[in-house]
Image (cartoon, coloured by chain):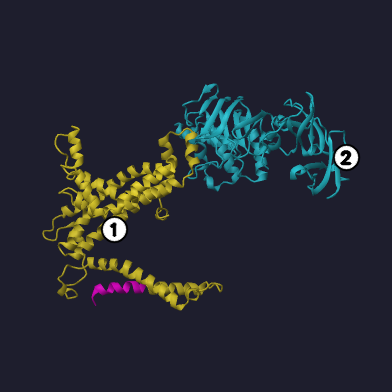
Chain colours: A cyan, B yellow
Amino acid sequence: MSAGVELDHVTVRFGQFTAVDNANLDIKSGEFFSFLGPSGCGKTTILRTVSGFLDPSEGKVKIGGQDMAGIGPNQRPTALIFQNLALFPLMTVAENITYGLRVRGVDKTARMKKADELLHLIALPGQGKKLVGELSGGQKQRVAIARALAVRPKVLLLDEPLSALDLKLRQHMRTELRSIQRQVGITFIYITHDQGEALTMSDRVAVMSDGVIEQVGDGKAVYDRPETAFVASFVGENNPFMGKVSKATKDGVAVDTEFGPLRGGNPKGLKVGDRAILFVRPELFKLGKGSAGAALSSRVKSVAFEGNITNLFLNGAAKKDIALSIGRHGSADIPGQGEKATINYDPSYAVALPEGKMARE
Amino acid sequence: MNSRFFVFLVPLVVIAAFWLMANRESKLAHDPTHKSFFERNGTVLGTVFILLVAFWALFLVTLPYLYMVVESFHPRLPPLKRGGPEDYLTLEQYKSFFVQPSDNSWNTTHLWGFFFTIAASVAVTVLNFAICYPLAYYMAQAGSIQKVRLIMLGLIVPYWVNEILRAFSLRLLLASKGLINQMLMWLGITDAPVDFLANNTGLYVGLSYAYLLVMIFPLYNAIESLDKNQIEAARDLGAPWWKIHRDVVIPYAKPGIASGCTMVFMLSAGSLAAPLFLGGPNTLWFTAIVYDFFFQAFNWPRGAAYAFILLAACIAFVMLMLRLFKVSLGETIR
């Protein structure tokens, strides 16, 4: 059984501080949904509000269409996986997994059967008698997932559960989480500050900043068609060029930057004279002269060979470097440090957005 | 030779044995980079350290108890006859706890006092735990910092007052014409004053209050280090509050609980002031019996024997309880 989650104009305040500002969102049943944002953006607050540890100051949280006001965390059809997992250290793996069933009064044989079943799902068969302390980081991770799944939640909430793992294991667990979600078929709400995690696992992502949901969409939309300067600068690498709009149509604008007029898409309907930021991703740049309004030249500050790609950093405006990555095929004539380089890009992939707050580096 | 002086030899023999063992061990496993105690501290300072520690350990800790142990195995004699032919080793002081020396009948008064003391101390420990656990939990997990500080202050400040004064003020409160009885009568709950002192209510209240801090701090320490997420995880998995305490908080705090309960039990069983001032006229507290043997009857051997009987019984009881609740002794003093 799965259920959707609806945030109906939810605002959460702590005293004077607004942690979540008017979040309005419909998470579909069975969806893998991620909240992505830097620390302190309010994503954990949203998760705690959905799980019932916090009450919204305004608005409603609905799970499966039912208003959750006045229903405590122990009564909600949600299960939460904590950032530090919060496994019970004095219980065995099987006792941990079946704790939710024990408090519901399920008898021991049924509990042990369920534990075996879940240990199988998380690929730890026969390890139920071990103490939690005897497990490795990745195994603990899976036990936490099994413990949450044991109570048959309609919605699973995950609060950056992979952040304590090393890179290899983290990447492995991404695939595993995704496949577990497909198997059990319930709604997963995932909190992370790691865009790689959010983009690879999720059906949809909500990018958050300072308590506000900036954009909701699938990974491709968030990456390719950002709607705010924050989303453009937070999700993936991006090169911002500030300036004033000098030409504007529905399809595209030209922004007057320090490197002359540069062209890009105009999703937010900028008008001539507006202050704007044009974003060009590093992998969009190519070496060489391109068409007018989609090329610029500057001096090379440094070159970093990374094997599959080579990263070039050119002197940009206001001490900010322009980064570009060049694949192997174009690496023969890469200019050296201190040389002048001319680069161009395909303006149909660049995006001009109204000036606004950007993600901190 | 008088057996009383024999006791002074025991520590010396123990020290000699340890010294020999240490010497042998350092010869067997000699680490050339390891400096000996005297090489590290110098001869003068090293000697001073050893003398000070030896003085403290021997004269202040070990010898008085050993002397009392030896005393308890002697008959009661006037000073002149001590060390004389009548001064032999005997078990009669221990026997007198069970059987009256005068007529060989059961010593029911003292046996009753003994069991009452143990039972009342258990009751006080349980009562104290029931009061302190919610408070400690609130302080450690639920309360805001300012409120916790206020509670701490409220708990500690009354202990600046002398124990006897505290016991007497409680007596004033609980007396038949005291504040509480007057309140009860004014409210119409009782017609005649309740004798809180005769029915030992005063005793339980006084003892619980006297050792409140001894219970609260180990509990607070143990619960405070519990990760809040554990509590929330249990709650999220559907546990009602009492199951969270039963399954998560109490198992985690068990060493602290054991430590607090052990101390409160030991201190209650050995307390003197509260039972003396707050016990009823028919209440015979065991330490009061010991006290009387020392200071009223001047029967030191019998007093010492009684004191050791109480000590041994308390230690045995505590060990049994620790075993029962599967806590090791080491955990309780963590």
Name the residue carrying label 1: B312
The chain containing the residue under callout 1 comes to B
Name the residue carrying label 2: A288
Q: Which residue extends farthest top?
A: A65
Q: Position of residue A267 (x, y in %)?
A: 74, 26
Asked if residue A15 lies left or right of residue B296, the reply is right
Q: Which residues are magenta?
A: B1-13
**Given this view, does label 2 or label 1 mark the residue nearer the observer?**
2
Q: Amino acid at mark 2?
A: Gly
SS for callout 1: helix
Q: Please identify the quadrant where the C terminus of chain B is shown.
A: bottom left
Q: Which residue extends farthest left?
A: B103
The prevailing secondary structure element of the residues shown in magenta is helix
Could you give the CA–CA distance between mark 2 and mark 1, rounded to whole angstroms? 93 Å
Q: Amino acid at mark 1?
A: Ala
Q: Please identify the quadrant where the N terminus of chain B is shown.
A: bottom left
Of the numbered discs in the image, which one, if any, rests on residue B18? none
Asked if residue A183 lies left or right of residue B143, the reply is right
Residue A112 vs B11, above or below: the answer is above
Asked if the stretch drawn in magenta spans residue B3, the answer is yes
The chain containing the residue under callout 2 comes to A
